[in-house]
Amino acid sequence: MINEMAEKDAIFQVDVGNVTINGMRYLKTNDDQVFTTSGWYATMGYALPAAIGAQAEFPDRQVWSISGDGGFAMVMQDILTQVKYHMPIINVVLTNESLGFIEAEQDDTQQPHSGVDLIDADYGKAAEALGAQGFEVHNLDELKAAFAKAKDRKGPVVIDVKISDLRPIPVEQLVLDKQTQDPAAVDAFVKKYHAESLI
C-alpha cells in the first residue's frame, strides 16, 4: 500500500526491529527515492527524528516515518516538533503490542519472554493530543482512506496500523533446503515472504 501512495522521490525513514525486515522486503524503492534505517547500531526510535531531519533538509519531498509501536513510543514526543514546524510527515506506526524482534530473539535462544509485551495504545489519539492528525486503522479499506487523507495534509499525520504479532522471518540464520526440509513448506515460505534469494 505504501508503494502505491509514495511519491516518486519519497524519503522513507524506517525504524529498527521487525519493521526493518518488513521495510526491506516490501518497500519497492526506485532510484529517486531514499530508504534509511539504523542498521549498524540498531537504535530503536530512529525513524521519527530521522524523518524530521529529512523533511527539514528536503521540504518539498514526501517523507515517511515507519515504526513499530515500541520504537515510536520511545520518541513520540517529537511529533510536537513536526507540528511546530508544519512538517507534512506521514508517520506510520505498525502496532503489534510487542517488541517483536526481541521477542523472536528470546524464542530462538530458548529464553523466557522478558520486557517485550506492550499495551495497545491508540497512537492516533495521542498524535491528536499533540496537534497532529491521527488515524487508527484495522483493515485495508481504513488504511487506504487514511493514506488518501494523509497525502493532502499540510502538517504531520500519525497512522496507527493494528497488525498481528506474526514473525516476518526467524532471526537466527535461515537456510531453506528442499533436500532436508519439506519442499512444499519451503515453497510456501518463499511465496509468502518473497524469499527467493534464500534458496
Image (cartoon, rainbow, N blue to C red):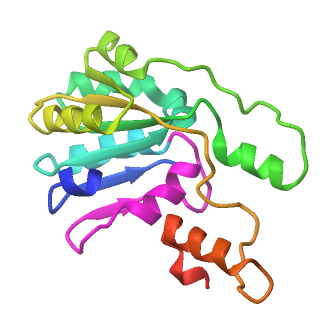
Q: Does 196 appear in magenta? A: no
| Residue 68 on image: x %, y % | 51, 39
Q: Give the range drawn in magenta.
A: 18-45
Q: Does 44 appear in magenta? A: yes
Q: Which residue is drawn at 30% across and 24% down?
A: 135
Total numbered badges shown on the rendered structure: 0
Q: Residue at x 24, y 38 (%)?
A: 89
Q: Quadrant of residue 170?
A: bottom right
Q: Of all residues shown, which one is farthest toward the front?
A: 184
| Residue 189 on image: x %, y % | 59, 68
Is residue 180 shown left or right of residue 155? right
Q: In which quarter of the image is residue 165?
A: top right
| Residue 151 on image: x %, y % | 14, 39
Please tell me which residue lies in front, 160 or 185.
Answer: 185
166 relative to 126, above or below? below
| Residue 4 on image: x %, y % | 20, 55
Quarter in which the C terminus is drawn: bottom right
Residue 16 showing in the rendered view: no
Residue 183 showing in the rendered view: yes
153 relative to 109, above or below? above
Is residue 177 shown left or right of residue 107? left
Q: Which residue is drawn at 29% across and 46% down?
A: 64
